[in-house]
Amino acid sequence: MGVPKLKPLPTVDEYLAGERAALNRHIYLDGEILVMAGESPIHGEVSANLVITIGTQLKGTSCRLRTKDTKVRSGPIPETGRGTRGMFSYPDVLVICGEPEYHDAHKDIVLNPKAIFEVLSENTEAFDRGEKFHRLQTHNPTLTDYVLIAQDSAMIEHFQKQPEGRWLYSLHAGLEASVEITSIRCKLKLADVYDRVVFPESPEPEA
């Protein structure tokens, strides 16, 4: 009996060709293609609020905002036609300062993110905190701010890159709190980020 042949991993070029024709979005991670689930109502509300509050503050500056349909490449320059290394992901909200740098002539993949905002969900939280953030830190030197926004309570976590390269963590909780993102001269008031959001009720403890 012969040894079954393993199906080759899709290359970056194959992923991009399929992704640009697909109706749904997919993350690419070293040859793996991961389907992105649809968003919850709270995810949609928070994402829209982020666009409003950040976009308004960026008017007249050298920075611009992109939403969840723009990909970011985090990895080495792919080997044309056969490379499988790297990550292509879709931040919920992305800020670029200066002229955008692109992966290719399609101009749908950004190389120079300045700040990334992710609205956490049960399915993506571990990835957003772990492998995704690690790849972004390693391969996107322009990134200075990584912001994680909770869905089940008013809470924002801010990772800010320091001049020596380490990342400073801060936690902001409660609708009275706010987050200063000095690199893009923006202030996030949690009351604005969670405007019109109704949090799920905590289950009553069993007697």
Image (cartoon, helix red, strand yellow):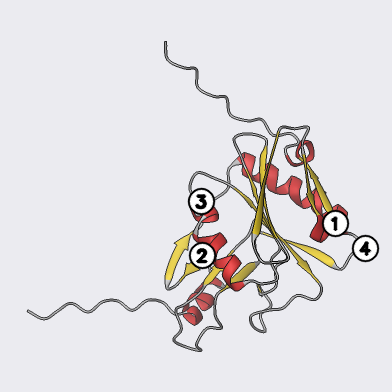
Which residue is depicted at the point 57% across and 60% down? 133
Q: Are marks 3 and 1 in contact (CB under 8 Å)?
A: no
Residue 100, placed above or below residue 187: below
Q: Which residue is mark 3?
A: 124
Q: Are marks 1 and 2 in contact (CB under 8 Å)?
A: no
Q: Nearer the viewer, mark 3 or mark 1?
A: 1
Q: Which residue is mark 4?
A: 60
Q: Position of residue 79 (x, y in %)?
A: 50, 87
First in sequence: mark 1 vs mark 2: 2
Between marks 4 and 2, how big is the CA–CA gap? Answer: 32 Å
Quick one: 135 or 84, which is closer to the camera?
135
Q: Position of residue 174 (x, y in %)?
A: 71, 32
First in sequence: mark 3 vs mark 1: 3
First in sequence: mark 3 vs mark 2: 2
Which residue is depicted at the point 72% across and 37% down? 194
Q: Amino acid at mark 2?
A: Ile
Q: Amino acid at mark 4?
A: Gly
Q: Which residue is mark 1?
A: 185
Q: Which residue is mark 2?
A: 27
Q: Position of residue 134 (x, y in %)?
A: 54, 63
Q: Nearer the viewer, mark 4 or mark 1?
A: 1
Quick one: 116 or 183, which is closer to the camera?
183
